[in-house]
Amino acid sequence: MSTSTNTTGAADFDFFIGNWKVKHRRLKERLAQCQDWLEFTGTTSTIKIMGGAGNFDDNQLNMPDTPYCAATLRSFDASSGTWSIWWLDARYPGHLDTPMRGRFQNGIGEFYADDTFAGQPIRVRFLWTLPAPDMPRWEQAFSPDGGSTWETNWVMDFERQRE
């Protein structure tokens, strides 16, 4: 992960290339004043694509009772210096989520999109941080009020799998 604004930006996700064990923590109910978290494990494998201007990861999420697979596609637009991130859930193979867009600055990746949840318009935020070497963290938050307040509803802590 870059620690300052990267003039090219295409290397911003290089820290994430490889194989990972994942600890998931997800709110049982979102935007419902819920404080109960569901914890489960998973794996992620990430590769570079498009000559390094993008990456792809394959995810196994071991949710109790409903394990599933999903994929993430990320691409870097050098003209704007921003990344776009798409999520494809194998449970809904005909639906590609609204792309998140953003960049890394000072070692933190911030990505945003306008979307809907349960029929309600929301703002979505992804944060990428590196709290410890080789242990990145991803967080998802929803805002029902245009970004004035945020509810973090999913946290993934990654640990690099050693070969």
Image: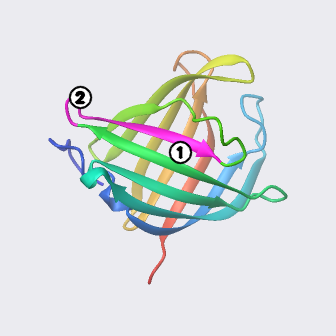
Name the residue at 33% across, 60% down.
15
Q: Earlier in the sequence, mark 1 or mark 2?
A: 2
Percent x, y of residue 10: 24, 47
- The secondary element bearing badge 2 is classed as loop
Name the residue at 58% across, 23% down.
115
Decide whether the magenta segment is chiefly helix, strand or loop: strand
Which quarter shows the C terminus? bottom left
Which quadrant holds residue 83? top left
Q: Nearer the viewer, residue 132 or 86?
A: 86
Percent x, y of residue 157: 54, 59
Q: Hey, what amino acid is under mark 1?
A: Glu
Q: Nearer the viewer, residue 157 or 13?
A: 13
Name the residue at 58% across, 58% down.
59
Q: Decide: few, some or many residues near mark 1? Use Cα within 10 Å; few <14, some 14-19, many ≥20.
A: some
Q: Which residue is mark 1?
A: 139
Q: What span is colored magenta in the figure?
A: 78-89
In the image, 151: left or right of 55?
Answer: right
In the image, 116: left or right of 44?
Answer: right
Q: Hey, what amino acid is under mark 2?
A: Ser
Which quadrant holds residue 103? top left
Q: Which residue is mark 2?
A: 80
Q: CA distance from mark 1 to mark 2?
A: 24 Å
Number of the label disc, if any, that sits on residue 159: none
Q: Nearer the viewer, residue 4 or 111?
A: 111
Percent x, y of residue 77: 27, 35
Residue 95 is covered by the magenta coloring: no
